[in-house]
Amino acid sequence: MISDRILYLECRSGISGDMTVAALLDLGANENKLREALDSLPLDGYEIRISRVKKSGLDACDFAVLLDEEHENHDHDMNYLHGDMQMHNHSHHHTHRGLPEIRRIIEAGTLTDGAKKLALRMFDILADAEAKAHGVPREQVHFHEVGAVDSIVDIVAAAVCLDDLSPERIVVSALSEGTGTVLCQHGVLPIPVPAVTNIVTAYGLPIHHTKVQGELVTPTGAAIAAAVMQKHNELPVDYTIENIGIGAGKRAYETAGILRAMWILPLVNETDRIVKLEANIDDATGEQLSYCMDCLMEAGARDVSFVPLYMKKNRPAYEVHVICDPCDVSRMEEILFRETTTIGVRRSAMERTVMQREERNVETPFGSARVKVCSHGTIRKIYPEYESVRELCRKTKCDFRKVYQAILDAAE
């Protein structure tokens, strides 16, 4: 069976704002919606160009923000890395915008609520990173790179495209980064630049060091990755690829210079293999075990349970059971050793038969909700997703049973 598809961002040549937008457009994001959203912003001094280019011999989409002379933003460039200072004209006028001004620009546009929320989150991530780098409150940050017109357009465009594609799940690969130094407004900085290191540190982004001379991960690209990456950031073991979008970068480095965005379709067989981990724990508090369960679930465990029991000398204890995929065993064992007092974990590989599952949206008198539909032969079961029931209950102030039944009725 094929379950819900995943948006996979493959960052083996790094990631930047323009590369991300181009890859998402090539994957199928609506260009007209993007242009309408950008036209609604109270922002001038630029135009966008969407075209096809050859990058490392591959046909790719290129998203370019063309600035007039007043707003021109000289990006990090290989010429700076090699010391060609003549390429940088300090006489150009630069617009320094802070987070409050950027928020007003985004709020004034006719973007969807989802696109606005995502764009604002990306700028919050950037502002926090710059604030930490410069030692000031984020509301007081006035930074050139993020305040420049092209960066505003890149981030809003990425948010609009992601909102249009509306993936249920996003997986981001390790961010491949180069080496060397880069010249920016604040002087010569090492790669990765401070804003990028602050973002990858704060959000636990995986980063892969390469020997490529140049900046492969921009602060904008890192902020986009941090804003969309989810807790369970791993590709399934078996999958098919439904579609591929290729976004071209602007710089010529010793790497492909592309970002690939893919629709991945996980393959889940009716019979699959899982691993059951067990450990006996007789000297941990309920709160400690609760936190351990949270850690295990956030790390991708299929299920976690505790069974009360009595051990030797009639000591009260718990037996923890963790169900996980084979590829996650080492991570689960590490959490058990770190968060509990156990000194040993038992494991058993098991095959199981699972019902075919799919998720879909249904419309109810209370609003839209998600349900899980499970089937096996002639057997069919429908389960409203708890998060959808909870959200509608809080929104409408109706009781849980009434909302739950309404979702079931709509699904039937």
Image (cartoon, rainbow, N blue to C red):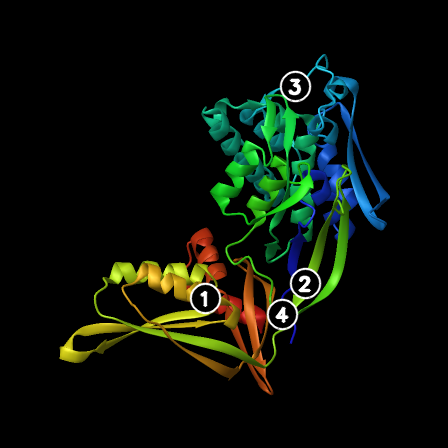
Q: Which residue is mark 4?
A: 3
Query: What amino acid is at disc 3?
Result: Thr
User: How much space separates mark 4 and mark 1, taking CA atoms?
Assistant: 25 Å
Q: Which of pointers 4 and 1 indicates the residue nearer the eye?
A: 1
Residue at the image point whose x is 72% and y is 34% from the top: 38
Q: Residue furthest top?
A: 91
Mark 4, residues whose alpha carbon is within 10 Å: few (<14), some, or many (≥20)? some
Query: What amino acid is at disc 2?
Result: Ile
Q: Is residue 96 above or below residue 266?
A: above
Mark 1, residues whose alpha carbon is within 10 Å: few (<14), some, or many (≥20)? few
Q: Which residue is mark 2?
A: 264
Q: Quadrant of residue 111?
A: top right
Query: What amino acid is at disc 1?
Result: Ser
Q: Is residue 68 above or below residue 285?
A: above
Report if the CB atoms under discs 2 and 3 are less than 8 Å apart: no
Circle 2 — which element? Answer: strand
Q: Which residue is mark 1?
A: 330
State which tag comes first along the sequence, 2 or 3.
Answer: 3
Report if the CB atoms under discs 4 and 1 are less than 8 Å apart: no
Residue at the image point whose x is 66% and y is 49% from the top: 11
User: How much space separates mark 4 and mark 3, taking CA atoms?
Assistant: 47 Å
Report if the CB atoms under discs 3 and 1 are less than 8 Å apart: no
The circle on residue 95 is 3
Q: Is residue 374 above or below residue 49?
A: below
